[in-house]
Image: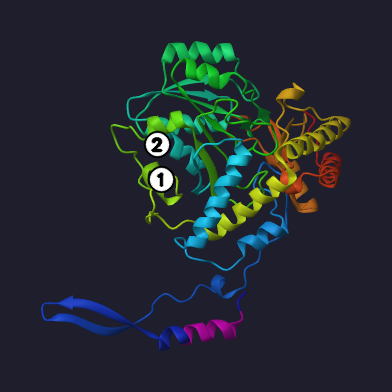
Amino acid sequence: MMPRSVLSRCARLTQQVPLESVRSTKHGVHRGMSSVTIPPPACMLRPLEVPFRYLFGPGPSNVPPRILAAGGRPIIGHMHSEMFGIMNDIKKGIQYAFQTSNNMTLAMSGSGHTAMECAVFNIVEPGESVLVAINGIWGERVAEIAERMGAKVHTLFKTPGGHFTNAEIEQALAKYKPVLFFLTHGESSAGLVHPMDGVGDICHKYNCLLLVDSVASLGAAPLLMDQQNIDILYTGSQKALNAPPGTAPVSFSERACHKMFNRKTKPVSYLLDMTHLSNYWGNDGKPERIYHHTGPVSGFFALRESLAILAEMGLENSWSHHTEIAEYLWKGLEDLGLKLFIKDKDLRLPSVTTIAIPEGYDWKELLAYIMKHHRIEFTGGLGPSVGMVLRIGLMGYNCNKANAAMVLAALEDALKQCRKSKA
């Protein structure tokens, strides 16, 4: 409750501070005075309160102090030369993280969905054929995005946890002749990391571009954009990179750029039009960058710092570290009598572990108990995996044995305390 004295003071201020109103008449502009009628909301007169949580779900993950500090630095103009220097650093950091020499590398002003839409909107024109591999929610999203902008969408389908063989992919490419094939590398809704070797070669055999989602896997599982012939790759800032949500690295190969910049029609989105974004990021070879939109300056500061931390650690060290902690967690889960959803160890996503919902338990009750008593976020499934799995994420800053032990202790407690049905 707001103190009565504060509310009374707000009411008096509302009555005493008139605002100037402006209206046009045939004799010119008439300026009058009118009182504010909507008072300041009580919630805005209270300090911001944010609880501490252990974010051990599929993302976002907890942000380390160093990245928080970077994001809190004083703002500079989004068109200042110093800002362009920071954007150049981000580009180099993404090239390292993606293992690519692509010039057309940048970070989108938005979450991973922004990069997802940017890729589809810029590569595909209405009426063109697109092939989407669906084994979780992210393929579903791309299929809908492509359908909305007028593409002819064809799908390969597996239930959550399934993966596609190269033979299945080639058969579909030969049948549908798409200009673009989408595949999720780290399917966080099921906890699966998809094999990538050979997929890019098959796509190029059929003159098709390969688009890959690595939002949940980048920095946690091996992925080599150039070596694996991936044409468009994107990720998000809030998973293993540990930056706040809101920026999304993306990179386009020369093949993708040729398709993208030789369109017959303009992309359906002005904001995501790579003709403009390539200039904003200094990738089009022109001497001057022209205003397109106001980028998230603080978000870029944080992303730059997160990429620096990854570079300091080294990609291979990051991959092996995530695998080591994941294996420690997997053994502990099995020791508790829980069943890992992805049976094949080589197909498990190191950053997001999925466990089958333990028989007889209400999964929502388990998650609520763990949040209430341990301040830990786990989540249930997402999209087609809802009701099938619990998801546990240990990524980047959160990826250590102490946190894995905390996860196991919280689950053990919940399994003892929550009611198990007799059914």
Q: Position of residue 82 (x, y in %)?
A: 52, 62
Q: On residue 285, which mark appears?
A: 1
Would residue 409 be found to the left or right of residue 245 on screen? Answer: right
Name the chief secondary structure element in magenta. Answer: helix
Q: Residue at x 60, y 77 (%)?
A: 2
Task: State the extent of the magenta-drawn residues as a range.
Answer: 3-12
Q: Position of residue 274 (x, y in %)?
A: 40, 42
Q: Residue at x 85, y 29 (%)?
A: 334
Q: Label 1 neighbourhood size at 10 Å, few (<14), some (14-19), many (20+)?
A: few
Q: Residue at x 44, y 61 (%)?
A: 79
Q: Is residue 356 visible?
A: no
Residue underneath mark 2:
121
Q: Position of residue 117 (x, y in %)?
A: 45, 39
Check the image and report above or below for 256 versus 312: above
Q: Quarter of the image holding residue 23? A: bottom left
Report the front residue among 401 and 78. Answer: 78
Q: Label 2 neighbourhood size at 10 Å, few (<14), some (14-19), many (20+)?
A: many
Would residue 59 be found to the left or right of residue 248 on screen? Answer: right
- In reply to whether residue 78 is colored magenta, the answer given is no
Report the front residue among 394 and 26. Answer: 394
